[in-house]
Amino acid sequence: MRNTIFFLVSLAVALVIYFGLRAFGIDYLFVAGYVIVQYVVLATAWNILGGYTGYVNFGSAAFFAVGAYSSVTLITIATHIEDWFSESVAAALNTVFPLPIPVLVVIAGIVGGLIGYGMGYLTLRLRGAFFAIATLALAVVLATLVVNWEFVGGSSGAYVIAPAEMIFFKSYKEYLFALMLLMAVGSLVVARAIERSKLGYGFAAIRDDELAAEASGVPTLNLKLVATTLSGAMMAMAGAPFPYFIGFIQPSSAFGLEYAVNSIAMPMIGGTLSWMGPLVGAVLLGTLQQLANVTISSAVNLLIVGLLLIVFVIIAPNGIVGLVQDRLRARRTK
C-alpha cells in the first residue's frame, strides 16, 4: 500500500512540474527538463547495481546507447518496409510501423535487460575493479560494433525526423519531456520498492560482505543477475527516446562520456544507499549543467561534475542524503 501511495504522490508531483513548465510557454524549459529527468532515470538505474549491490558499472553509456540504437534500428526498418516486402505485406506492416515511442521504450528495455543479463552472467564472478573494467570493455565492444554497422548509420550517424505536430502537446520536445517524466516516476517507484523489499536486503548483504552473505545462504549470483538485468533495462529505456530528442545520432553522441560520468557521479553526490540520493544528485548536477550551458559553455559540464565529486567525497562520503541523515541522528542523540 505504501508503494501505491508513493506512486500516486510522485505522479502528482510530476503533473505539477509538467503543467508548471507548460505555463511558462518556453520550449527550452522542456529541453533542459528532459535532460535533467533523463539523468534521474540513468542515475537511479545505475544505483540499483552500483549503490544497492555495490558493483560499480562503467558501462552506463553502453546501455544508454543500446536503447538509442534499438530505436534507430526499428526506425530504419520502418523506412525500408516497401523496399524489402511485397506491396500487400508492406501495406500490412505500415499499419504497425513506425512504432510509437512508448513501444520503442519497452523494446529497448527488453534488449537492455537481455544484454545486462548476459553481461552479468559473464562477468559477475569478477569482483571489485575487475568487474568495473569488464563493464568498460563491454562499452568499447558495443561502440565498435555500432561504428561498423552501416544499417544504423555507422560512424556517419543517422537522421531521425520527429513529427512536426502532436495532438495534445504544443511541441515534440514537450511530449518527450512528459514521457521521460513518467519514466522517472516509474524508476523511482521501482528503486524504492526494491530498497524496502527482501530483494533490497539481499542486495545490501552483497554490498556489505558478499562472502558472508553467500555463506549465510543468500543466492548472491542470482541476485546480481537480477540487479544487472534491471539496471541495464532501465538505462536502455532512458536512451530509447534519445534519437527523436537530438534529431541526429552518431556513436560519439550515444556513447558520450557525459552519460558514463554523470550516471556514476550523480548517485555518489546524492547518496547511494537510498532511492532519494540519485534523484537529489541528478536534479542538482543536471540543473547546474543546464545553467552552465546557457551562461558559460557546455564544455564545463564535466568540470562541474569533477569538482563537486571531489568536494562531496571529502565532506560527505555518503552523499547529500547521507549527510542530512547523519546530522538528524546527531540531533536526536543530543
Image (cartoon, helix red, strand yellow):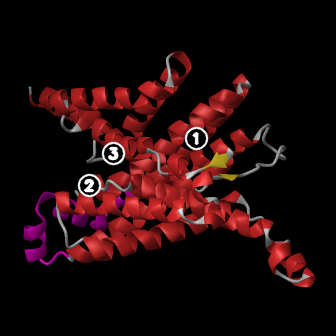
Where on the picture, by quarter, is residue 312? Answer: top left
Say whether residue 293 is visible: yes
Note whether 210 is above or below 83 in the view shown. above
On whether residue 211 falls in the magenta region, the answer is yes
Q: Quadrant of the C terminus?
A: top left
Check if mark 1's residue and mark 2's residue have beta carbons within 8 Å: no
Magenta stretch: give its range: 192-218
Residue under numbered circle 2: 56
Q: Earlier in the sequence, mark 3 or mark 2?
A: 2
Q: Is residue 103 left or right of residue 269?
A: right
Q: Which mark is residue 319?
A: none
**Which of disc 1 and disc 3 is earlier in sequence?**
1
Question: Residue 211 at x, y = what percent?
Answer: 9, 69
Is the Cβ of the residue at disc 3 closer than 8 Å to that at disc 2? yes
Q: Secondary structure at mark 2?
A: loop
Residue located 33% across and 45% down the image: 264
Q: Residues within 10 Å of mark 3 (few under 14, many from 20)?
A: many
Residue depicted at x 51% and y 47%:
252
User: What residue does disc 3 label?
Assistant: 264
Front of the two marks 1 and 2: 2
- Give yes or no for contact between labels 3 and 1 (Cβ–Cβ under 8 Å): no
Taking 262 as reference, is 311 left or right? left
Q: Amino acid at mark 3?
A: Ile
Identify the mark at residue 14; answer none if there is no mark: 1
Q: CA distance from mark 3 to mark 2?
A: 8 Å
Between 179 and 246, the one lying in front of the other is: 246
Q: Is residue 292 above or below residue 205?
A: above
SS label for mark 1 = helix
**Closer-to-camera residue (31/274):** 31
Residue situated in front as seen by the camera: 3 or 261: 261
Residue type indicated by callout 1:
Ala
